[in-house]
Amino acid sequence: QADFIVIGGGIAGASAAYWLAPHGKVVVLERESQPGYHSTGRSAALFAQSYGSALVRAVTRASRPFYETPPPGFADHPILSPRGVMFIGGHGQQDLLDAMLTELNRVDPDIHAIDGAEVCRRVPVIKPEWVIGAVVDPRSMDMDVNELHQGYLRGVRQRGGVIVGDAEVSEMWRQDGNWQIRTTNGDNYSAPVVAGSGRPRYPRRR
């Protein structure tokens, strides 16, 4: 019996469980033998405030302080490290570069433009006759996905949560105000709230 059951122990499930754990007992059910076996374990992530829609950029900005200064004991190594990003434009794309710079300067005034010669100096493999310039985001960072993922998992355990491997969900149904879950190994779990971090592939009782 738990207050929250999280299905999936990848980065989405682990982070959800981490933030839920102070509010009740959390159980994470992971169908593989260990969390992060699939996409989380193969991710090469970039932290970029210039990426995505206005809503995505706002969420990214809001998360930066946590990644730059995580709670004590959360990570053994820095989660973010400097990288920088260039959005390169060819002939006929100057208007697009100008519009991008205007839009992204609303997010970060440090984002700036450089000319084609500077682009080629920084990236010599680019043909000078093709490039006209670029928009540079100097504050984009590499993200250590494994460090972040392990920090969330460690935090779930420190906050009293339980992470169960080899626990693929085979059935789930609603009964007496709780979700009832059965895994392929025959174990049963119950909680009023279930969060799924992946596409469900199990049948539901009606």
Image: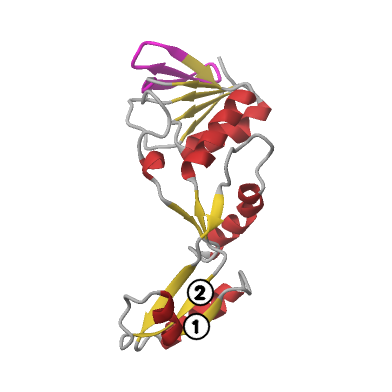
Q: Quadrant of the C terminus?
A: top left
What percent of the width, then of the height, locates residue 157? 58, 24
Q: Secondary structure at mark 2?
A: strand
Q: Nearer the viewer, residue 190 or 79?
A: 79
Label 1: few (<14), some (14–19) or many (≥20) C-alpha neighbours in 10 Å: some
In the depicted structure, whether residue 138 falls above or below residue 206? below
Q: Position of residue 60 (x, y in %)?
A: 57, 56
Number of numbered discs: 2
The residue nearer to you, when weighing 128 against 206, is 128
Q: Is residue 164 found inside the magenta-colored segment of the image?
A: no
Point out the stretch of residues depicted in magenta: 167-188
Q: Locate the N terminus by quadrant.
A: top right
Please state the horizontal and vertical placement of residue 76, each as a whole percent of the image: 59, 38
Q: Nearer the viewer, residue 195 or 163?
A: 163
Identify the residue at image location x=56%, y=78%. Answer: 112
How far across and how far down the image is residue 15, in percent?
55, 37
Three-letter residue code for mark 2 = Val
Amino acid type at image mark 1: Ile
What residue appears at the point 37 percent right and 37 percent down from the top-left corner?
A: 199
Q: Residue furthest top?
A: 186
- The residue at which mark 2 appears reads as 136
Residue 114 circle label: 1
